[in-house]
Image (cartoon, rainbow, N blue to C red):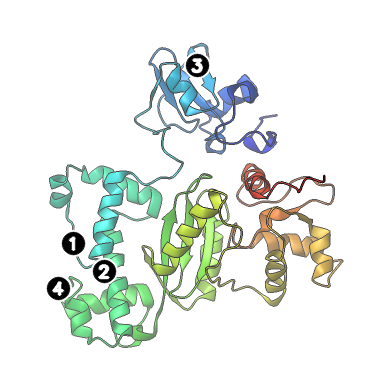
Amino acid sequence: MTQTALDLPVAAFPGRRSAELPPRDAMMRAMLERDASFDGVFFAAVRTTGIFCRPSCPARKPKPENVEFFGAAREALSSGYRPCQRCHPMEPAGITPDPIRRLLDDLEADPGRRLRDADLRQRGLDPGWVRRWFKKHHGMTFHAYQRGRRLAKAIHQLADGAPVVHAAFDNGYDSLSGFQEALRAVTGRSATASRDAQLVHVSRVATPLGPMLLATTDDAVCLLEFTDRPMLQTQLERLAKRVDGAFVPGPNDVGRALERELGAYFRGELRTFGTPLLTLGTDFQERVWQELRTVPYGATRSYGEQARRIGAPKAVRAVARANGDNRLAILVPCHRVIGSDGKLVGYGGGLWRKRYLLELERRGLPAPATVC
């Protein structure tokens, strides 16, 4: 049977010691299969090239006899290997490259600007590389991302009472007809009717467990999911049905606030999230999700106990399904629910992430008081 990161012990987290690495054949298999679930668990170094990589690196795979494994990037560096220029193993999983970050910062400062391929080249960037990065991480080209940001700004201006003509031309549209067409494509409404459209801002957040997709209204967070979760597309489709609004790329103030909170949480400095949440479930799901939010930081409960707490002791499977339908990973802490036998089961982001989150929270608890 093929071993995955789900089968590894709790110690199998980023930065583990090489002495505690998984079996060599399991690591070799993960590297050959480019298994991203092992990213952060180990690093693969190739003696013939002097380069070390993440397990998911797309580079051509070497012969097994030329590979050695390390538990941390610093160990590979100290052994004389240099980091791969394709998978960038020194960077946290999902981190945005500096050139892309500068592009995004410029767009945030002025969403109405237009950066063309010639502008990218003047910055020393290959337009093809920029296009591929945005397609991979945002599901659209850089130019489509820019159009989405311009349209979001225009819709906000309409909501604030700006004349249609000002909202159009202030944001780079060459004609009112083009502006109307763009609005209908996104909101399904005319410019006047779009004044009441609710925007859902979709952005990407880098975390130690890989990138997450974040969706926020102007008032609350409505989705936070790992980008490699199999159900992500389904969750987005369900959210779109629940929210009568328009999805646009880029963060807003709510998203930025949550990103700061996530950073503090992963540093072990935050136990309770303060950013408002919009759960948007059925009555039963809302009961389950509300109860999930009462599980203390660093603690766990069984599915059976969760069912009893909502007054439905026989609905254990329904509770488990509602946990799986949770669109707010970490914030509505379904990772704190375990099997009745104490085993880790049922986490959409992968059990290795569930282990990591529980260990992170346990390390963040204060040491027990000493009895004198």
User: Label 4, label 3: how many angstroms apart (C-alpha)?
Assistant: 57 Å
Question: Which quadrant holds the N terminus?
Answer: top right
- Mark 4 or 3, nearer chain start: 3
Q: Is residue 176 visible?
A: yes
Foreground disc of the pair 4, 3: 3
Q: Is residue 369 left or right of residue 56?
A: right
Contact (Cβ within 8 Å) of mark 4 with mark 3: no
At 71% from the left and 46% from the top, the residue drawn is 367
Residue 290 image offset from top left, x and y in percent: 69, 70
Q: What element carries label 2?
A: helix
Taking 31 as reference, is 258 above or below it?
Answer: below
- Label drawn at residue 174: 4
- Label drawn at residue 114: 1
- Label drawn at residue 67: 3
Residue 335 image offset from top left, x and y in percent: 67, 53
At 20% from the left and 72% from the top, the residue drawn is 171
Q: In this view, which residue lies farthest toward the front?
A: 372
- Mark 2 or 1, nearer chain start: 1
Q: Is residue 268 left or right of residue 109?
A: right
Three-letter amino acid code of the residue under disc 2: Arg
- Mark 1 or 3, nearer chain start: 3
User: Label 4, label 1: how many angstroms apart (C-alpha)?
Assistant: 12 Å
Contact (Cβ within 8 Å) of mark 2 with mark 1: yes
Residue 339 image offset from top left, x and y in percent: 80, 51
User: Label 2, label 4: how many angstroms apart (C-alpha)?
Assistant: 13 Å
At 51% from the left and 56% from the top, the residue drawn is 262
